[in-house]
Amino acid sequence: MNKADLTKIKSDMATELAKYYSPLEYSFDKKTFSFIKNEYRVFWGSSSTYPDSIVFRPQIWAKNFRIEQVLKDLFPADLSYETIGKSQNDLVKETGNYTSVYMIYHEGGGTSYQYDVEKDTDLRPIVEDHKHFMDQLGFPFFEKLKNVEGISGYINDRVLQADDAEFNTEETINRLKSFFYRPQALSGIISAHLAKSEQLEKLISRYRILFAGNDFILNDVEKVISHFKNS
């Protein structure tokens, strides 16, 4: 797909999406191809381009300003301070009760929730599908994350809910590891401190077990723990 066609598709997509997001007071950031309102961002950028098409895989991101400030203080070299992000596909897998004509079901298991767009593709059904996703899953996801208590609950309840015997099984550890990446791990431990979790010590112990051997995450988790201990 040549540059002119690609530019036109993105411009037309932005125009159609703006009809939905502008009345909701989301502003469009052309540089990142995102619609943003306060701490919430719907990201349509970083698409895959093929000779005859472009593929959009939207993501939704939430940022908490209290968590962000801690991250900036402790990790000033980081390029982003988002709290939690999910692709449409990831959020659908997490909830398990949503279908779309734009979902691809793979033979070996798993799905891809994406929008394949060619030069003559009608964008309106795609935007309608995305609107349905946001109404059913996206905006409720944002609502869960509106404060540090909600963020801590969303991230950390899954770590705390198992008893000790179940938590220490390989199956549980691997399942939890598949959920976490560095931003979510840091947001989880920071939000637990800010929310003054009654199970903070248990959570810290389980984080140390969960990320044992993964110094990339664990060293930064320990830095957060030390920060709150000494503050």
Image (cartoon, helix red, strand yellow):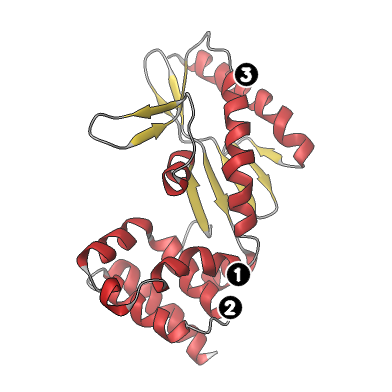
Q: Secondary structure at mark 2?
A: helix
Q: Hey, what amino acid is under mark 3?
A: Arg
Query: Label 1 vs label 2: CA separation?
Result: 7 Å
Going 60% across and 71% down the picture, which residue do you hit? 149
Instruction: From the viewer's side, name the closer residue of 141 and 17.
Output: 141
Q: Which residue is the site of mark 2?
A: 194
* Residue neighbourhood size for the residue with mark 2, other residues' Cα within 10 Å, grouped as few (<14), some (14–19), many (≥20): some
Q: Which mark is residue 124?
A: 3
Residue 157 vertical position relative to residue 16 in the rendered view, above or below: below
Q: Position of residue 93 (x, y in %)?
A: 41, 44
Going 28% across and 65% down the picture, which residue do you hit? 172
Q: Secondary structure at mark 3?
A: helix
Residue 86 vertical position relative to residue 72 in the rendered view, above or below: above
Q: Which mark is residue 148?
A: 1
Q: Which of the two discs, 1 and 2, labels the residue nearer the N terminus?
A: 1
Q: Hey, what amino acid is under mark 1?
A: Val
Query: Label 2 vs label 3: CA separation?
Result: 42 Å
Q: Is residue 75 visible?
A: no
The reply to whether dot 1 and dot 3 touch (C-beta < 8 Å) is no
Going 32% across and 56% down the picture, which residue do you hit? 178
Instruction: From the viewer's side, name the closer residue of 88 and 41.
Output: 88
The reply to whether dot 1 and dot 2 touch (C-beta < 8 Å) is yes
